[in-house]
Image (tube, helix red, strand yellow):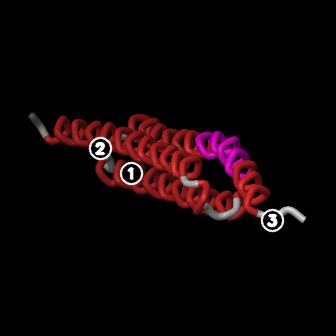
Amino acid sequence: MNEEERRSRSVEAVYLCSVGSLAEVTARSIEQLHKVAELILHGQDQEKPASDQAHILTRLTCAMCREVGCLARKFSDTLLKVGGQRKAEELNPLVDSVLLEGSNSTTYIQNAFQLLLPVLQMSHIQTQRSRTRTEPQP
């Protein structure tokens, strides 16, 4: 195997690893949001108000999206370093694809966050019901 073939395989390996890693981080992020939803629904008695939960979930989602964006940029930078000797016509589509996958991952995480809205609404309703039951009647 000559040097050019070895580099070509190396670029392809970095690309495949990058896309796979972004998919894994995305899946783990969505799993975490799912777990948070379960905890919200099953722990109503000790929970914070829905507005506090929403604020925390917003910050968590933003942090996840920022991390995915940083990873996509690092992966694309690595592709550029590894494939520095390749033609731009060959390398640019791979770099663009990694950045696009990072953007898609961010969209998936944001969509998962949006799906938590009914959970927060249920939490708020259940919290209000439990408060009215525990408050003394005049």
**Amino acid type at mark 1:** Phe
Question: Which residue is painted at 75% across and 49% down in the image?
Answer: 125
Residue 90 in picture, x, y percent from top left? 39, 35
Residue contact at pointers 1 and 2, CB within 8 angstroms: yes
Residue 24 in picture, x, y percent from top left? 38, 42
Q: Is residue 9 left or right of residue 26?
A: left
Question: Which residue is painted at 55% across and 39% down in the image?
Answer: 104
Residue 35 in picture, x, y percent from top left? 48, 47
**Mark 3 lies on residue:** 136
**Residue 21 vertical position relative to residue 69 in the rendered view, above or below:** above
Tag on residue 75? 1
Magenta-colored stretch includes residue 61? no
Residue contact at pointers 1 and 3, CB within 8 angstroms: no
Question: Which residue is painted at 32% across and 46% down in the image?
Answer: 83
SS category of the residue bearing label 1: helix
- What is the quadrant of the C terminus in the image? bottom right
Cα–Cα gap, marks 1 and 2 = 8 Å
Magenta residues span 111-124
Give the main secondary structure, helix, strand or loop, of the magenta stretch.
helix
Cα–Cα gap, marks 1 and 3 = 59 Å
**Mark 2 lies on residue:** 14
**Residue 81 vertical position relative to residue 3 in the rendered view, above or below:** below
**Amino acid type at mark 2:** Val
